[in-house]
Image (cartoon, grey):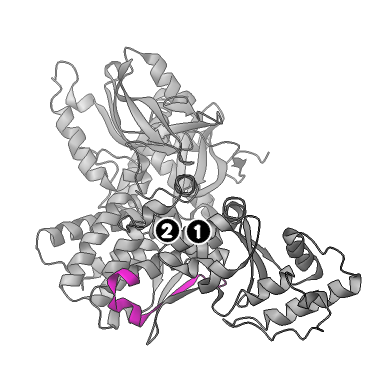
Amino acid sequence: MGLFHPFTVRLSDGESMVVHLATAVNAERFPEIRQSIIDGTFHRFSHPKTGKPFTVEAPFMYTDMSRDTFFAVHPPKTRFAWMDDSEALEQELDKIPASLSAYDKRYARVVYGLGELREKLVAQEAALDDRIVELMKVFLIHEHPFLIQKPRLRLMLDGVDDEKYGFVAAFDHDREAFEVAVPRDIADELVEDQDTLKGWVNRNHTHANIFDDSRERWVNFWRWSPTLSAIRTLREMARLAASGGAVPMDSSRFQTMLRTLPRGKRLPGTAKRDLRTLHDHAKRAGEAKLQDTLFEIRFGIELEDDWAFNNDPDDIDTLWSLLRDLPDSNVEGNANLKSLYLAEGKGGGWYEPWSGDVHIGETTLRRRERFEDVVRHEVGHAVHEKRKAEVDPWLADEFGWRMFDPTNAGIDAWVDMMGGWGALTSGQRRDVRAFLRTALGTGSSWNPGPEPNAPANHPWSQPGFGPRLAYERTGADWYRNNRNWFRVGDQAFFLNFWYQKLMTVGMSTLDLINRGMPSSYAAMSPYEFFAELYALYYDLDDPMRPNIPDDAQAWLDANIGSAGNDLGPAHRSGGTRIPRPRRLSSGASCLRT
């Protein structure tokens, strides 16, 4: 069949499994492999627990000597390296004796992903020049301009029959897909008029002429993308910076690159590394504003200008390193983390969930370790906000965190957890509810509200009355007093004067906070507990990190992201075929269905 080797791949839910992946395929000897690629079953596996199918994208060499065909297959995210990959393929082709394959007859291509490979095989099966297929895609975009209103369009030839040339249109980071088609009579006219097509390419794409494929083996209309051109320019500039050369930062080409580079999660891994190289160069050159710009491109997060113009030359560098080492999904593309502000003259940090803004106090920058802890903590808030549906139940079930509104139902539920109202009359219960609302104060305060004025013979004033004891033992800056909170069984009860909430938390959680975490501020609320836990878990050098329970570490790893931020040797994708696309209609495509 070819050369297959075992690889361990990490799945999106944290599970791992061993799969056998091809490093070389000989389609002449084993045509069933060629057919499996066309069918979409090649490198396709099932999840070990759920049975859900997935496809692994991994590099391999595809050869078919009977058709003089040579394809170097690479993962889709490495498209930006097409020139280097083309040269590597040429070096391999040079080793093939002319007696086995004449150079001028070879069909040699670099392709990115099994979808592109399948497209080449479909075109070959239909005796279509793949360069003409790419120009048909331009024709389809002209007929359906809405397709380019979203970023990262993918157009692939899906099949050819007597009526049409069928394509599938999809987008990176978007599940929406469409069927589009060129009627057979129009397509045949395009195929037969190659001189006109070549002339159009020569006039409009002199630097990316897909008909000049003597040494450039990636034939895809994406070569005309300004994004891809920007990534190539970034590679050149990073190499200049790494070699100590002069980087033309004021040139129009450099500035165009900055404007057209994709941001955050849309950047390939090598581009992220190249941005870091340029960032280091900019830091050495004292170009703080460029550092700011490169940071925003790398992470997709707006950085207030004050970061570039303050007196700390290492602050952006520290932010870069911190965010780079967190799980990508926590930072890049996190709609709940939009901007980083520097709060002049202030310390600590705070997060605004309604805007996605993080504020870091300027005085915090003076202590590097404190600065890092605060940044991780505030990012933890943004992650919590993004993943509330998963995090909140986990905090309740695993750590006993529960919050109750000061409504009648909320107060009753809180009291029920203490053992209930007992023999109190309905009027006495109404009084206690009013006392608790008074005790909670007006909110946004670290201090208790006014002490309720209850009669001496009222149940509120009796020894051992739980709701009153919970109030009295909470105290100002209540998180500092957590060892004194009123307790029933394995739960502690307190009032949160900042949020105007009644709360409970597990005793074992308080023990973890007091003995195993850096700050008792984690006892302030479930939000602060999660942010502190997050900051500790992703600080691999903190000596207190091993205090986090093993099951909590496993949950964070599986649901929030690996603390090692590692990836396996092969990357998982959704498959080579796009399910249930919608069909478009126009004068150049099939009828609506």
Q: Describe the element under mark 1 as helix, strand or loop.
A: helix
To which quarter of the image does residue 98 belong? top left
| Position of the N terminus by quadrant | top left
> Residue 306 lies in what quarter of the image?
bottom left
Give the magenta range: 354-371
Q: Residue furthest left?
A: 244
Q: Quadrant of the C terminus?
A: top right
Distance from label 1 to label 2 (Cα)? 8 Å
Where is 49 relative to 514, above or below? above
What's the residue at 49%, 52% (across, down)?
Answer: 142
- Residue 362 highlighted magenta (yes or no): yes
The reply, left or right, for residue 220 in relation to residue 138 is left
Relative depth, front residue between 414 and 532: 414
Contact check, label 1 and label 2, Cβ < 8 Å: yes
- 478 horizontally vs 512: left or right: right
**Nearest the camera: 235 or 445?**
445
The residue that label 1 is drawn on is: 511
Q: Amino acid at mark 2?
A: Gly
How far across and down, in percent of the image, does residue 580 sit?
Answer: 61, 37
Q: Does any portion of residue 516 appear in the rendered image?
A: yes
Q: Please name the residue shown 21% across and 63% down the image.
A: 278
Q: Is residue 449 magenta?
A: no
Reply above or below: 42 against 308.
above
Q: Which residue is mark 2?
A: 516
Q: Secondary structure at mark 2?
A: helix
What residue appears at the point 63 percent right and 58 percent down from the top-left corner?
A: 491
Q: Amino acid at mark 1?
A: Asp
Residue extending furthest toward the front: 463
Residue 243 coordinates in the image, percent (x, y) = 10, 58
| Residue 590 place in picture, x, y as percent | 61, 38
